[in-house]
Amino acid sequence: MRVIVVGAGVVGTMHAWQAVERGHEVVQIEREAEARGASLRNFGQIWVSGRAGGEELRTALRARETWEEIGARVPGLGFRPNGSLTPVRGALELAVAEAAVAREDAAARGHKLLTPDEARAVNPALRGDFTAALYCERDAAVEPRTAQLALREELLKSPNYTFRPGREVREVIGGSAVRDDHGDVHSGDVVVLCTGAWLGGLVRELAGPDLPVRRVRLQMMQTAPLGEPLTTSVADSDSFRYYPAYASAALDALNAGQAQAETAAAHRMQLLMVQRADGGLTIGDTHEYEHPFAFDTLEDPYDHLTEVVESLLGRPLPKIRRRWAGVYAQCTDTSRVVHRQQVRDGVWLVTGPGGRGMTCSPAIAETTANELGW
C-alpha cells in the first residue's frame, strides 16, 4: 500500500510512522520546510492525569505506552516518565484532589495524594507553601521542538519513506492522489490529511463549511535554565477547572467558593510547567477562542504565570528567553478525541485533537491505521 500523508506535525508524523511500521510506502508532504505549528509550540507533555474517563483516557494511556516504546528506539525524542504534581492550597482545592484520587480510574492514572514533605521528596524544587499535592505517575514528557525531527530521522532510514517539504497540497485528483503547488501529483492508495489548524482552503473545500472543529490560540514562554532539576511536570489548581477528569461536586464547590484570579479568568488560564532538556522551563498557558485572534501577545498573562510559578518554587524565575503564541485545532464537541472524516474516496481528514495532540497522536494514528485496514 502507498500512503500519502499531508502534514508533518506530530499527528501527521505519527500516521507516517504507523504506515512505515506496517510495511507500507509513505510519502509525507509538508507546506513548510519543517512543521511550525502547535506540534512545536506546546509543553511536550504526555498528559494522562486530566483526561476524561473512558475513550479519552484509554487513548491517552495507549499513546503513553507507544511514546515510551518509540522513545526507547529514538532517544532524540527525549522521552522521560517524569510524572506530574499539582500542588493545592486550602480545603476547597484539597477536596477536588481527594475526589480525583477516589475515582474508579485513579489507579490507571497513577493518582496519589501526597503531603508537602512527600511531594518535595519527589520534586525538591517545590519549596513554596501548599497543603498537599496530587501526583500522577503516568504523566510523561518529550521535547516538542525536536520530536518531529527525531522521528523523521528514524523514518528516513526506511527505503519506504519519502519526505517532501515546501509543498502545499492544492487539489485532490480522482481517488487517492493530490497535486501540490509545484504542479507535481502524488498518487497512492489512501491520502490522510493531517493539516492541524489549517482549516481553510482545500480542507474547507473537501470537508464543507460546517466542519465541527475550531481554532484555539494560546500564549506560552520559556526560561533560561533553572539551575536545578524540576523532576516532575507541575500544574496548578486552575488545571482542575480546565481538564474533564476533575469534574465533581468538589469542583463545583471550588468554582462557587473560590474565584480564579482576575487575569487567569479573563484569559482562561491554567499553569502547566515542564523542564526542558537544557534546564529551562516551558510555562503556560492561555486559551483564546473568539475570532479574529490577536496578532500580538499580552504581558498580563505572563506576569500571572510568573507569580504562580514563583509561589510554588519559592524562588525567582530565571530570565524569560522566549515568548510565543500558537494555534491548534479542537473538536467543538470537546468530549471527542479527534475528528476523523472521509472527505473523498480514499481521502481522510484527521484533525481537531485540541490540547491532546502531543499526548494522544500515537494512538490516534494507530486507530486510523486499524480502521483503514493498513
Image (cartoon, grey):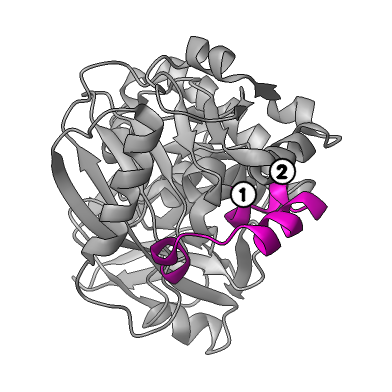
Give the answer, above or below, for where 237 lies relative to 107. below
Q: Position of residue 247 (x, y in %)?
A: 74, 53
First-in-chain label (1 vs 2): 2
Secondary structure of the magenta portion, mostly?
helix
Between label 1 and label 2, give the one nearer the viewer: 2
In whole angstroms, how far apart are the C-alphas of marks 1 and 2? 8 Å
Q: Which residue is mark 2?
A: 96
Amino acid type for the residue under numbered disc 1: Phe
Q: Which residue is mark 1?
A: 240
Q: Position of residue 190 (x, y in %)?
A: 53, 59
The residue closer to the viewer here, 115 or 221, is: 115
Disc 1 element: helix
The residue closer to the viewer here, 238 or 71, is: 238
Residue 104 relative to residue 311: left or right? right
Q: Residues within 10 Å of mark 2 (few under 14, many from 20)?
A: many
Disc 2 element: helix
Give the answer, above or below, for where 289 lies relative to 258. below
The residue closer to the viewer here, 97 or 244, is: 97
Magenta residues, start to end: 240-267
Is 287 magenta? The answer is: no
Q: Residue at x 32, y 36 (%)?
A: 310
Q: Residue at x 43, y 46 (%)?
A: 271
